[in-house]
Amino acid sequence: MSEPIPFSTALRERSSSAHSGSEGAGFMTDLMRGKGTRDDYVALVAQHWFIYEALEHAASRMLMDPVAATFISDKLTRLPALEIDLEFLIGPDWRERIAPLPTTERYVARIREVAATWPGGFVAHHYTRYLGDLSGGLFIGKLMARQFGFETNGIGFYLFGDIADPAAFKDRYRAQLDAAPWDEAEQQRVIDEVLVAYQFNTDLFADLAAAKARGHASVVA
Ligand code: HEM
């Protein structure tokens, strides 16, 4: 009999086309290819603030759950870095000058909903953002630094100072996914929620492109 596929592998395989959809969104590819502006980048950072505020608030509540808690680590926490980046990019009044786009509002509402009720759903959102940040995110940070002349200010979000070996960290994270005591039905629900999380990220890039066409007026005042 062949070995069953580990859950983390199934998850990666089942979400790989959704990943391509997020990765290939026009707003993101333009930014990566040097066709984006500093304002585009700032608009993205601003949306990240709302998303991580919800995710990390949820994480503080999910520490009570024995399964969810195994995924939560201070080393991942992004909100303080995002706040320093926004202060650098926008100024001390950054909080009054940023607003969530419609997809961000829906994304945040979904994170709040699952985090209150469903540990597996929380893990789905946690995985989609942080494993992405520790993968393509590291590369994106370097590209943004080069394009916009940042050193560390402005790209702190992409610098995981407490994670010396991201590949080893991700391997441990995948081992935790494999060890989670979820039956097949629950594993399926978690995968479905990861697909929902990817869709929010893809839709967010469409919102950001639309906001760009309006001069980012609704994102950064
Ligand atoms: C231009 C944008 C992007 C690039 C270049 C990129 C690139 C990559 C690469 C190279 C990997 C594989 C790393 C490895 O094998 O360990 C990866 C994994 C991942 N990415 Fe992205 N990515 C992008 C956008 C996104 C977005 C928008 C999300 C969702 C928010 C995302 C979520 C993930 C996740 C969850 C993984 C881990 C998959 C796994 O191993 O289980 N990525 N990304």
Image (tube, rainbow, N blue to C red):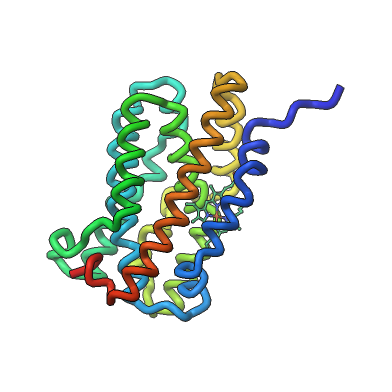
Q: Position of residue 160 (x, y in %)?
A: 43, 53
Left or right: 34, with 44 as reference point: right
Quarter residue 213 falls in: bottom left
Number of numbered callouts drawn = 0
Q: Quadrant of ligand 1?
A: bottom right
Does residue 198 appear to the left or right of 77 in the view shown?
right
| Residue with the most extreme right position | 1
Residue 55, image x, y percentages: 34, 41
The image quadrant where one finds the N terminus is top right
Is residue 153 among what the camera can see? no
Q: Nearer the viewer, residue 86 or 195?
A: 195
Up/down of 149 relative to 103, above or below: below
Image-quadrant location for residue 10: top right
Q: Is residue 62 above or below residue 198?
A: above
Whether residue 148 can be seen here = yes
Q: Nearer the viewer, residue 148 or 214?
A: 214
Residue 84 drawn at (x, y percent): 25, 60
Q: Position of residue 60 (x, y in %)?
A: 30, 33
Quadrant of image for the C terminus: bottom left
**Residue at x 49%, y 36% (from the top left corner):** 193
* Between 159 and 213, the one nearer to me in the picture: 213
Residue 191 versus residue 204 in the image, above or below? above
Residue drawn at the location 46% of the way across and 44% of the way down = 197
Task: Please report the residue visible at 43 percent of the width from the left and 50 percent of the height from the top.
Answer: 200
